[in-house]
Image (tube, rainbow, N blue to C red):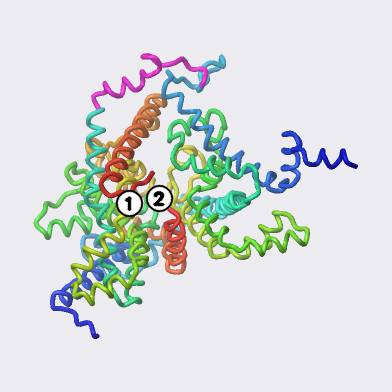
Amino acid sequence: MNEQSITLKKKPNLGRRIGDEIKRNFVLYLMAIPVIVYFVVFVYLPMYGLIIAFKDYRPFNRMGQGGIWGSPWADYYGFGNFVKFFQSPLFWSVIKNTIYISLLGTCFSFPAPIIFALMLNEIKNLKYKKIIQTITYLPHFISMVVICSMIIRFFQTEGILTKLITLLGGEKQNYMINEDAYRPIFVGSGIWQGVGWGSIIYISALSSIDQELYEAAVIDGAGKWKQLVHITIPGILSTIVILLIMNIGSILSVGYEKTILLQNDKTASVARVISSYTYDLSFGEGNSDFAYSSAIGIFQSVVNIIFLTIANTISKKVTDSGLF
Amino acid sequence: MVYKPSIGEKVFNLFNILFMALMIFICFYPFWYCVTCSLSKQADTASLMLLPNGFTLATYKDVLAREAIQKGYLVTIFVVVVGTIINLIMTTIAAFLLTRKNFAIRGFLTWMMLFTMYFGGGMIPTYIVYTQILGLEGSILVLLIPGCISVYNMIVMRTNFNGIPTSLEESVKVDGGNDMHVLWHIIIPLSKAVISVMVLFYGVGHWNSWFNASLYLQGTEIQPLQLRLREILILGQTAAEGDAGDVSTMAENIKYATIIVATLPILLVYPVIQKYFVKGVMIGAVKG
């Protein structure tokens, strides 16, 4: 009897504890199996595929050579594909195009939802406000293929927006094959797609500002402008900062879906961004340079992380708020 | 004290109301324009139409009679239904596991999932692994399984599950039920709102997706609607611009009808679902 109570007090060994845990949470472990399998096979295994960026990749051949692991390492201690990109005549043009469109996005697409949310906040009629929200979120839910085919239709020679441009004194032409028009169309349609949906997060930040602050400000004689500067903007500043950091952290990520759908031979020289370039190198006509485009993909991620870290550090010093 | 708006404020309010009216017009009219063009006998695509230019439904008959569109519709409907069911099952289980406080590998699971929000294989390595190792090329599974758990959606769900009082599940445990019973009889019935948000998020995502199909299902019969659309409306278009218009002979009003046929389901359910969408985003936004 006595001996037994002593053994009970002792911590059971590890194997026993694991056994107990599995017995106790057996159902949970059963449920975890598909989740773990999914993540390991479909999400983590592709990360293993990243090593082809450092390889002279060849698909499996009949001799059983090649493949992800079997291909020989690239030159320059495995960094050959990166060196090839840096030396490529297209390197600067691709980087320039990407940063150009990104910066246009930061200057125009980023502030647009903020301004829209602030203006919407001044609409006091709730029913009208609701209608505005419902309709401005709409473009966000329409598929990229449909959006792009609408853009292409509207800007062709007989398109309705081309008509509008000619009424404003512009030339009548197919703007989809005009290099100078590509960027404004890309960024402008991006604002149209995202301004309503992007404002949701600011609207929710605005609604969490204490209403008593405004009442106090009115009693103190502050007008609308002063309320905006001293209460509203500080109230949503941390949200703005976090989203701005994330925006800067994706400086080299211009969406490939829209680029692939909108670009054509005539506009490729300004449209080609890093993500669409990696796509073209792998899947474009006559191309299948998988290792090279993987290396470019890694380059993009590394630069993004560097920019994210810099933006975060600056923001922490200046505004005291940051992402991490 | 009655608050009196100044003249500047009145001017601003008027301007604001007009600005918002313009926003409504800009966001809604392009779709209405497509509708009017598609119903017109002869689409005058360069003028601001409020009503169709001569009413016809022949355009829709033409579009719906096309085999490519019919097949595309079938594939898309299958993917939306089956894909969303898989999404729901997997996301619910994942979120539920992360709410189990005395589950030894909960921390591990959390990190395993959150890590993938920031790191991934990227387009090309993923393509290589999926085709060379997993052999997914040409299989419809590639539209159903990858992305079946969106970590962002999973977090939204977990936040929601965490809000359910634990006393309720204790009552199930007292009656001898296990965690499966807790999930089925307590958590799911109390989470109908968030589950409907998920149905909508995932459903619209499947409806609109085209990219994976274009990578993995090239040259097969499994072409979702969006890919068919791309073929008809975008690839045909660019080809026509290059070769003086001998490829794309489809009339403009029929092209617009194609756009509407592919978008109508979204346009119809949209007014009903948009309030849930906003709710879903708000839950996620609060938690960061």
Q: Residue shown at 23%/37% (left/top)?
A: A97
Q: Residues within 10 Å of mark 1 (few under 14, many from 20)?
A: many
What is the number of the mark on residue A149?
1
Is there a contact, CB below 8 Å, between mark 2 and mark 1?
yes
How crowded pointer 2 is (Cα within 10 Å; few <14, some 14-19, many 20+) is rated as many
**Picture quadrant of residue A303:** top left
Q: The N terminus of chain B is located in which quarter?
A: bottom left
Q: Are marks 2 and 1 on the same chain?
A: no
Q: Which residues are magenta?
A: A69-90
Q: Pinpoint residue A34: horizontal percent, then vertical percent.
A: 63, 43
Relative vertical location of residue A173 with respect to residue B20 in this rendering, above or below: above
Residue placed under numbered mark 2 in the picture: B229
The front one of B280 and A23 is A23
Task: Using the image as rendered, state which of residue A200 and residue B24 is in the foreground.
Answer: A200
Q: Position of residue A79 (x, y in %)?
A: 37, 19
Dot 2 falls on a residue whose secondary structure is: helix
Residue A40 visible in the snapshot: yes
Q: Secondary structure at mark 1?
A: helix
**Chain letter for the residue marked with disc 2 in the picture:** B
Looking at the image, residue B152 lies above or below residue B133:
below
Across and down, in percent, residue A274 comes to 31, 34
* Nearer-the-camera pick, A168 or B145: B145
Q: Is residue A103 left or right of residue B65?
A: left
Determine if residue B62 is in view. Answer: no
Amino acid type indicated by mark 2 = Leu
Could you tell me which chain the residue with mark 1 belongs to? A
Q: Position of residue A168 (x, y in %)?
A: 11, 59
